[in-house]
Amino acid sequence: MEQKRGSFAGKLSAVLVAAGSAVGLGNIWRFPSLAADNGGGAFLVIYLLCVLLLGVPLIWAEFSVGRSTQLGAVGAYRTLNKRWGFIGYFGVLAAFLLLGFYYVVSGWTLEYFVESINGNLSKYSTPEEYRLLFDSFKTATWKPLLFAWAFILITHFVIAQGVQKGIEKCSNVLMPLLFVILFVMAIHSVLMPGGVEGLKFFFKPDFSAISTGTILAAMGQAFFSLSIGMGCMVTYASYFNRETNLKTTGLQVTMLDSLVAITAGIIIFPAAFSVGIFQAGETPMAGPGLIFITLPAIFNSLPWSMLWSAIFFLLIIVAALTSTISIHEVVAAYLNEEWKIERKWSNWLSTAGMFVVATLASLSLGVLNEVRVFGLTFFDLFDYVTANLLLPIGGFCTSIFVGWVLDKKFLERELTNDGKLGGKIVPVVRFMLRWLCPLIVFAIFLDTMGVI
Ligand code: PHE
């Protein structure tokens, strides 16, 4: 069935919607725990380099592919060149696995929100108690599962409202609110006694703390956090209009995303040192529980702790939701455009698939913990494989595709809106896509395998 393609209306919407996809659990949950496990400041530096050298050119490349074709990931790559359509399929696969664990963590935030409201979260006091609480929660069978399923359904119903009403409205209101609250919390956290140690850990690079895999993790995180390498930005850009300035939109999204990740670090590290979760001079091991242990401990030190934690977890839910919507949309748009399944049913079909992967990921932390693939639980496997392998490989292919396969004029046309905007930077971007990005990704893979 032919349907009229939706598009984003407002001028700011392109930025807010794309930032909504980029800003999510990647910034608030994944980034701090990776930084904690990989030497703090050193990780931050490598991460920011990856954002600059890989993230910016690739986000522009993906925007160009999506907006020029007005199609979702699979259709977009294939329309530009039949043989390169595989990048799109690759993205759909990545989206699927990624959502598997993403919905589980989103479910945790939902659970913590509910526990904040009913007062359970303020019953504990020491970080150790919060650690126990988190561990017992995530390994349980039904509760985390139900919350993950609930999250899937919420995403489903927002998408069902359509591109403009659902996705755009949600992002426009809630993203700015998130920034404000993050800012307030960062100030509070820095002022906590002993917080300075945390700032030192986060901002003073100690390159001796880097181990094998750190650079790969930083690159994977850059891809993950900017939502690139799997056709998500391609799909969103297909809803941009011809006047959208792709260059500034890409830069603004990258900056907002990095800003939120850094702010999350400024919230979490001072607090973690202040309440004694981390000790000065030690290399902290954090794992996925970091924010679920640190944040409740911060809230406990505040008056009206229940209110603070409820608001904060609500905002993380929102940040996660604007991201799950964007990933879900990659799969739904694919089924809709390629298999010609009506939007309503393509949405349901992707939802059904998500139930399966999310269930596997959630149970793998508890009853299915013994089932390991390459020594990893499904949860860790989905996380590791998507961020560290699939997304970088997808980005690698996109940079080769846009840099080498497509006509020289393609990038110029898209980045200058057919010559209406200045194009001085286009040759630089093209050079980066042809040489720098593929080489960096390749070198990082070789480094991780111990070849260099
Ligand atoms: N960027 C999102 C986050 O940081 C996750 C995401 C990855 C979204 C890939 C879309 C595509 O949470």
Image (cartoon, rainbow, N blue to C red):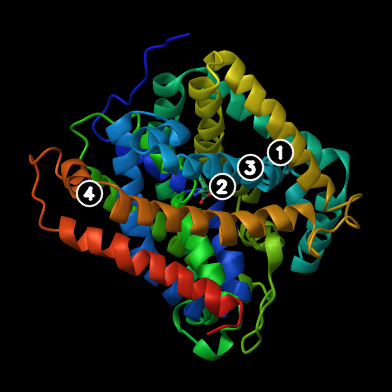
Q: Quadrant of residue 124?
A: bottom right
> Which residue has dot 3 on it?
99
Percent of width and height locating residue 224 = 51, 55
Q: Is residue 156 above or below residue 302?
A: above
The label shown at residue 247 is 4
**What residue type is disc 3 on?**
Leu
Query: Marks 3/1: CA distance?
Result: 22 Å
Picture residue at 40% right of the left edge, 54% below the top: 257
The foreground one among 254 and 357 is: 357
Q: Secondary structure at mark 4?
A: helix
Query: Marks 3/4: CA distance?
Result: 28 Å
The foreground one among 320 and 383 is: 383
Comparing labels 4 and 1, the label whose residue is closer to the camera: 4
> Which residue has dot 2 on it?
312
- Is residue 424 found left or right of 66 in the rendered image? left
The label shown at residue 114 is 1
- Is residue 248 found left or right of 39 in the rendered image? left
Q: Earlier in the sequence, mark 4 or mark 1?
A: 1
Q: Secondary structure at mark 1?
A: helix
Q: Given contact means CB atoms under 8 Å apart, are the residues at marks 1 and 2 in contact?
A: no
Q: Secondary structure at mark 3?
A: helix
**What residue type is disc 2 on?**
Phe
Q: Earlier in the sequence, mark 3 or mark 1?
A: 3
Q: Residues within 10 Å of mark 4 (few under 14, many from 20)?
A: many
Comparing labels 3 and 1, the label whose residue is closer to the camera: 3
Q: Given contact means CB atoms under 8 Å apart, are the residues at marks 2 and 4 in contact?
A: no
